[in-house]
């Protein structure tokens, strides 16, 4: 699993074609507070049931609050056969501090 910083992800999203799937694994209440535009919500507790709806060949950037849950989900997805998993280090909190300072934090 690769890791990417918020700054690196921001730059990458501007040039990536096709764009990776931004997979937000936080809870719905967290997602409502703030999220990266275009991110798909799939809470961590539901991954074992819902990951089969994802393309195992697609590049997936996994996002959570600080990067711990997303690391766990990324490891799970890799064990399930996904080959292009990227963890957002620092999570949405790093995105709010380093990329989009107008984003709400919690």
Image (tube, rainbow, N blue to C red):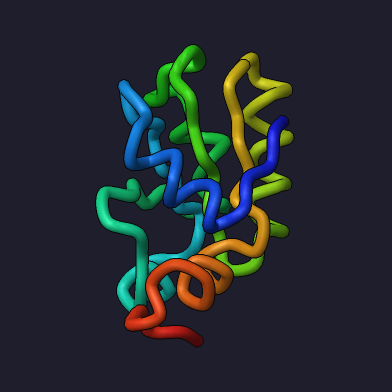
- How many labels, in total? 0
Q: Is residue 33 left or right of residue 96?
A: left
Q: Is residue 41 above or below residue 61?
A: below
Report the front residue among 23 and 28. 23
Residue at 52% across / 77% down in the picture?
97
- Note whether 95 is above or below 19 in the view shown: below
Q: Tell whether 38 sits left or right of 23.
A: left
| Observer-nearest of 49 and 18 | 18
Question: Relative to 72, does residue 91 appear above or below in the rendering?
Answer: below
Q: Position of residue 3 (x, y in %)?
A: 69, 42
Q: Nearer the viewer, residue 43 or 6?
A: 6
The image quadrant that residue 90 belongs to is bottom right
- Image quarter of residue 81: top right
Name the residue at 50% across, 62% down. Answer: 26
Q: Residue at x 35, y 33 (%)?
A: 15
Farthest-out residue, left: 38
* Percent coordinates x, y for residue 4 in the rendering: 63, 45
Residue 20 in percent (x, y) is at: 40, 31
The N terminus, quarter of image: top right
């Amino acid at each position: 699993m690769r890791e990417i910083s918020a700054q690196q992800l921001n730059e990458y999203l501007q040039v990536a074609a096709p764009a990776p799937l931004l997979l937000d694994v936080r809870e719905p209440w967290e997602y409502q507070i703030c999220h990266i535009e275009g991110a798909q919500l799939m809470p961590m507790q539901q991954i074992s049931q819902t990951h089969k709806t994802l393309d195992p060949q697609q590049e997936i950037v996994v996002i959570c609050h600080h990067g711990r849950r997303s690391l766990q989900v990324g490891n799970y997805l890799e064990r399930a056969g996904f080959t292009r998993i990227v963890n957002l280090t620092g999570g949405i909190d790093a995105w709010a501090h380093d990329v989009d300072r107008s984003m709400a934090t919690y």
